[in-house]
Amino acid sequence: MIELKNAVLNVKINEHGAELTSVVSVDDRIEYLWQADSHYWGRHAPILFPIVGRLKDDQYTIDGQNYHMTQHGFARDMDFHVLEHDDEHVVFELQADEQSKAKYPFEFDLRVTFSLDEHLLSVHYAVHNPADDTVLPFSIGGHPAFNVPLKPDEGGFEDYTVTVAPRKAYSRVPLVGPYNDVQHEQILNLTTPMALDHDLFNEDALILDLDHVETTLMLSTPVNDHGVALTLQNAPYVGIWSPYPKRAPFVCLEPWWGIADNLEADGNFMTKMGIHRLAPQSTFDASYQLRFF
């Protein structure tokens, strides 16, 4: 387990999956991160790579050959190597191996950097294509879950809101089962804070089309002054999720550079919705920030 710390926050990250597992405030010992109770959901904040969401029938094709890969890819279930580490900074690396190539026949180098600065935890993804002549198709995303309520004796799930800035009406990509139905986008009015209710998630995640515009989502309550704010600079989508019909005491704010297969997907990975096609010897960068208050 890797630890980061400063005068404000103590952070823990597991080498397995490079998964953020704990963010605790030094002053009042609030645990912001969901603690992976498997009765509801047995993860904290997995990294989604090389897909976000589900493939149709958990399959895809490359050059006519069929491959099997389950929801959100395999990075979350693999051990990363630690390249650098000090009190406020750590860099993890995952590279292709025989295990990954059985599911995903590409060379890749994924580096995940966590940087702590007072109340702010920054997460940076760098996907490098080391090949000389092969395009690397991939998606990537985060899935951090936050306790709701943050203080069990102060308010409940329905006392929290998600405030989105810019405040406007957003295109929402609906899900039919695990697959996206972008052909029937809906409008979600977020000019005012969205009050949390478990029934919001009766059709799975709320997926907002951000169109790569810098966006901040703040999870907070008027009951106290504590909350979490997620800021994304260049992401096409963000997901807001809590399990349904379970009344789980957490909410995920998920930065996505990818999306689940469309209902009409034909299985061709190179033309999959939300896929990035990284040129040989190139690097893709993406990042988000979490502010804890």
Image (cartoon, grey):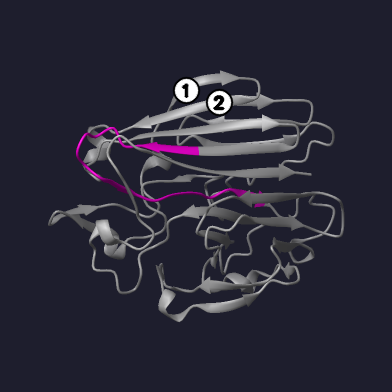
**Image location (x, y in percent) of residue 97:** 26, 32
Residue 136 magenta-drawn? yes
Residue at the left extreme of this rendering: 64
**Residue 168 location, quadrant:** bottom right
**Image location (x, y in percent) of residue 150:** 76, 50
Q: Amino acid at mark 2?
A: Val
- In the drawing, does residue 146 fall left or right of residue 106? right
Q: Are marks 2 and 1 in contact (CB under 8 Å)?
A: yes
Cα distance, mark 2 to mark 1?
Answer: 7 Å
Q: Amino acid at mark 1?
A: Val
- The quadrant the C terminus occupies is top right
When the figure is inspected, residue 147 is found, relative to residue 207, above or below; the finding is: above
Q: Report the label total.
A: 2
Residue for point 48% across, 39% down: 125
Please state which of residues 277 and 34 is positioned toward the viewer in this rendering: 277
- In the drawing, does residue 274 fall left or right of residue 153? left
Q: Secondary structure at mark 1?
A: strand
Residue 126 magenta-drawn? yes
Task: Say whether residue 1 is visible.
Answer: no
Residue 82 is marked as 1
When the figure is inspected, residue 35 is found, relative to residue 149, above or below; the finding is: above
Residue 9 is marked as none
- In the drawing, does residue 141 fall left or right of residue 108? right
**Image location (x, y in percent) of residue 54:** 37, 60
Q: Which residues are magenta?
A: 125-146
Please state which of residues 134 and 253 is positioned toward the viewer in this rendering: 134
Residue denoted by label 2: 90
**Image location (x, y in percent) of residue 39:** 55, 54
Q: Secondary structure at mark 2?
A: strand
Residue for point 72% across, 56% down: 219
**Residue 56 location, quadrant:** bottom left
